[in-house]
Structures are given as C-alpha cells and as structure tokens.
Amino acid sequence: MRRVVDGMNVIGSRPDGWWRDRTGAMRRLAGELDRLAARTGDPITLVLDGRPRDVGTPDAVAVVFAPGGPNAADDEIARRVAADADPGSLLVTTSDADLVRRVTEAGGQVEGAGTLRRRLDELSP
C-alpha cells in the first residue's frame, strides 16, 4: 500500500501547541512517518502546505510542499490520486471531508488522521 499523508491535517488533529513551532511539528511528523515506513516497507509521501521548510531528511518518506494558499496540499493530494495509474493502491490519510470525497471519487482509499496518529504513537521510542 502506498500512503499519502495530508500533513497539516494530521498535525492539526492533536492540539499539542504545534502552532507555536510549525516547522518543528512538520519535522516530528516526518520523523514519525519515517519510522513507520521503515517498519512497514510501504512508500509514504508527506504533503505539507506552504513554502519549503527544513523538516530534516527522512530516509523513507518523500516530502512535498504545496505552496499556493489555502487547500494547496489538498489540491496536490487530489491531483496525485486522480493522475495515478492505480489509485486503489493509494491510502490517503486525512480527516478533511472534502478531500475524502475527492480521493474516493478518484478511486483512492482513505483513513482518518486519528487512525494514523494512534499507529504512530505505538511506534514512539
């Protein structure tokens, strides 16, 4: 299963003060996803809103920044799913209802941000 993660949706699903250090929150999520990818062997693409930032250099996670304002990451994710030759093998992580609709209409699968968060918590060192 190939995973595409709506990064800010997952980050924002937990009100842990992430907004005080947006780049740090992105870096933490990239690191957590890197551990998940190492364990499962599944390719992961993390899509984040805004300008590129230093989120580290995860070994097994492709980090994509989607500049362009509100919903830029959602648009990028929906575009990727719609353009994919095998959208049924994509699992998009988001709890954004509109993005869920767009992904499922294009043939992709969806899991909620909370489901991924729980899985990441189980892998925490």
Image: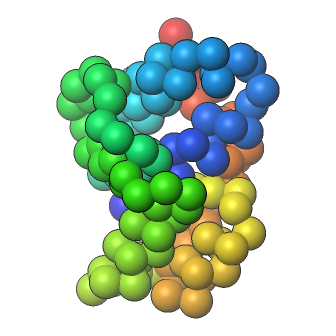
Res 17 → quadrant? top right
Q: Residue at x 55, y 77 (%)?
A: 103
Res 18 → quadrant? top right
Quarter of the figure with the N terminus: bottom left
Q: Is residue 71 visible?
A: yes
Q: Residue at x 66, y 80 (%)?
A: 101
Instruction: From the top left corner, tell me how far across and down residue 15 is, in percent.
Output: 78, 26
Residue at the extreme right of the image, as rendered? 15
Q: Residue at x 31, y 49 (%)?
A: 64
Viewer-proximal residue among 82 and 121: 82
Q: 100 above or below 34?
A: below
Q: Residue at x 62, y 70 (%)?
A: 99
Res 27 → quadrant? top left
Q: 81 above or below 64?
A: below
Instruction: From the top left corner, tell me how far across and down residue 54 is, in percent.
Output: 29, 23
Instruction: From the top left corner, tell me how far across and down residue 40 is, in percent.
Output: 39, 42
